[in-house]
Amino acid sequence: MNIHEYQAKELLRSYGVAVPAGNVAFSDSQAQAVAEQIGGQRWVVKAQIHAGGRGKAGGVKVADSIEEVGRITDEMIGMNLVTHQTGPQGRVVKRILVEEASDIQNELYLSFVIDRATQRVTIVASREGGTEIEEVASHSPEKIITETIDPALGLADFQCRKVAAALGMNDKTRMTQLVRIMKRLYRCFRDKDALQVEINPLAQVAGDKLICLDAKFNFDDNALYRHPDINELRDLEEEDPKEVEASGHDLNYIALDGDIGCIVNGAGLAMATMDAITLHDGKPANFLDVGGGASPEKVTNACRIVMEDPNVKALLINIFAGINRCDWIATGLIQAYTTLNIDLPMVVRLAGTNVEEGRKILEESKLPFLQADNLDDAAAKAVATVKGEQT
């Protein structure tokens, strides 16, 4: 789960991490009131959407007067902001963040992430702050610093000093500040079951002060039951409505831009199914994992959610039953077909527990399911139906 920048900064502030003075606003008058409360001569107005690259897309602007704060806010709120992370459809800006402008002398990059290779929390840092870390990794990988944290020992002071020295923070004042920031970020990361905490940039401003100018959090959805305070920060308007609905039915759904709807059980099988579709020159429309113990009602809800995408021209159901049962899946597909009035081709591949019972149920239904023998056969049939080569 992601949260807005202003929410991330409030969380950092609660852990004693320095962030600019500022507040969220939903109108030009509110933005002007925030600027007046902050004081000063210059302010930064930032669009609040769940996507990076806002600055390049016109979602971050500097204002030199209270009146300009209001004008910029009026232009931003309601605009469709298109960045490299939103896709061509963009995101509508519904709120902005007004902050005091900082006199930036140097910009750094600092983040804590879960490294899947080592299965440990890892510090990722660079002197190339203020730019996309992916670009730095692509063009200048030697400029990226990493430090792996032992889960039994936690983040040690010597590791913080090592990273600080690599970032050029060698004098006592700046090193002390950076060590303190890193220790507090790690504590926040650990306490809140985060998957990522990214500060970009971590800026050195007047007086050699280090301050987090931009912050991003990503939390483990499976741990949110332990953090109702974090769960309350979820902005459903920033998420795909189909993904929100799917989560309410205990389904994992991610929308894609293809035309073959995928319903599977298990993330690995979902990835393999999408690869198989692509191999046959097709394009998956989604990733939908019904998980274990899929009841007929759950299968019906999965079909309905997938079909809400107007681009879907065929459904591919690929089930390898272990905890699930193929007869449950088959019953759910028949229920979905009859109650949802499905008029799209449905390719079904069943394997595993009660597979013969499941196939028999589908055959005896006399409904036009296209049964497949294996994954490759299923993908080929699904792509063929979309291309009009098979009915």
Image (tube, grey):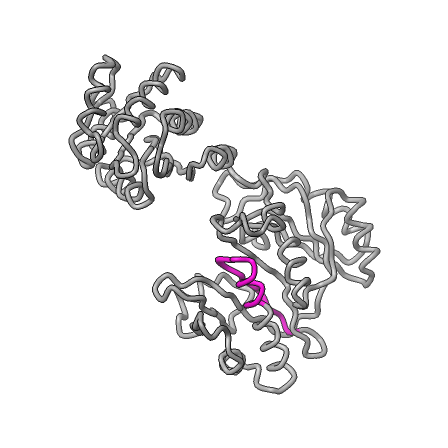
Q: Position of residue 234 (x, y in %)?
A: 59, 45
Q: Position of residue 184 (x, y in %)?
A: 60, 69
* Closer to us: 122 or 355: 355
Q: Position of residue 92 (x, y in %)?
A: 60, 39
Q: Is residue 226 above or below residue 235?
A: below
Q: Is residue 39 above or below residue 125?
A: above
Residue 186 in view: yes
**Quadrant of res 19:** bottom right
Compared across the picture, whether 83 is left or right of 299 comes to right
Magenta-tinted stretch: 185-204
Residue at 73 percent of width and 47 percent of height: 25
* Closer to us: 154 or 105: 154
Residue at 36 percent of width and 25 percent of height: 296
**Quadrant of res 60:** bottom right
In the rendered image, the residue lying farthest to the bottom is 171
Q: Is residue 168 magenta?
A: no
* Closer to us: 6 or 324: 324
Residue 144 in view: no
Position of the C terminus, as image quadrant, is top left
Residue at 24 percent of width and 20 percent of height: 369
